[in-house]
Image (cartoon, rainbow, N blue to C red):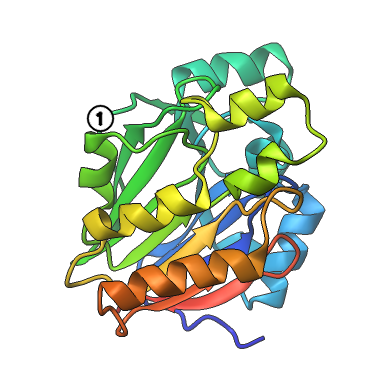
Amino acid sequence: MDDFVPGYVGLTALGSGSGGNAYVLHSPHGNYMVDAGFSRKELCCRMEKCGIAPESIRAVIISHEHGDHVKGCRVFCNKFNIPAYMAGAVADYLDRRNELPENVVEFLPGSGFELPGVSVMPFSISHDAKDPVGFKFMVQESKIALATDLGCLEKHIIKHLHNADILVLEANYDLKMLLESDRSNELKHRIRGRGGHLDNRTAAQCLREVLGPRTRSLLLAHISSECNNRELLHSVIEQELAALERTDIQWRLLEQDVPDVGCYAQ
């Protein structure tokens, strides 16, 4: 796998799915990890495969407290002596479970904050978690937006996602496959509800509202291994982009076990 070119604005997905989620945001001022849903050892292993030095991470930014987003947060942050940014409710939850890093900076969903070279806007999303958020990052003139683990697409979410140079959007399940699965009715209801996840069709239809003239990269994330089919999802997204005549967009489906590197905004 080719090394990510330092100094550029872009995104590396270390892995995405129910088994773990983590991304590295690249800026000319350094690298930032978004979620840390793998063990410290696994995070370091995946970064090294992508040509990213773990020591280059300046902070970890957490979307919510579920294990597939915070598994390695405490150990990784403490190992490399870096801060973890998260909502207060997430910090309280992790503290009660003795999973809180030593250096924590709390943010308020809906209120932006600054990191060296990066403006961060954490926006509220609907999920069964403690103050869950998606993120809009502004790096120089580039916009990178990320929203996974969301049960619905409200107007303010669409506004934050709109016209991003790089867009990471959840496409978790196929409705027919979910309904025909062996999962309990309670779990099926949760996944389909406002506190659950986004299905393929909703994600595809959302593209009509969120893709803008500057959008060049689209990454479909948090794909279920049990209630989705990658070929089916590929077909759904391909048809939608064709209907929108967006042949200029580079897009792909993120994988759980294989990092995805080389998504550039500049």
45 and 203: which one is in front?
203
Residue 150 seen from this side: yes
Which corner quadrant holds the C terminus?
Answer: bottom left
The residue positioned 27% from the left and 29% from the top of the image is 110
Q: How many marks?
A: 1
Give the farthest residue toward the bottom: 2
Q: Secondary structure at mark 1?
A: loop
Q: Is residue 6 left or right of residue 110?
A: right
The residue positioned 17% from the left and 72% from the top of the image is 213
Q: Is residue 28 left or right of residue 5?
A: left
The residue at which mark 1 appears reads as 111
Above-or-below relation of 204 to 132? below
Q: Amino acid at mark 1?
A: Ser
Give the x, y percent position of residue 190: 61, 24
Above-or-below relation of 100 to 28? above
Q: Name the quadrant containing residue 138.
A: bottom left
Which corner quadrant holds the N terminus?
Answer: bottom right
The residue positioned 68% from the left and 37% from the top of the image is 179
Q: Is residue 20 left or right of residue 89?
A: right
Residue 265 seen from this side: no
Q: Name the quadrant containing residue 95.
A: top right
230 and 168: which one is in front?
230
Give the x, y percent position of residue 10: 40, 71
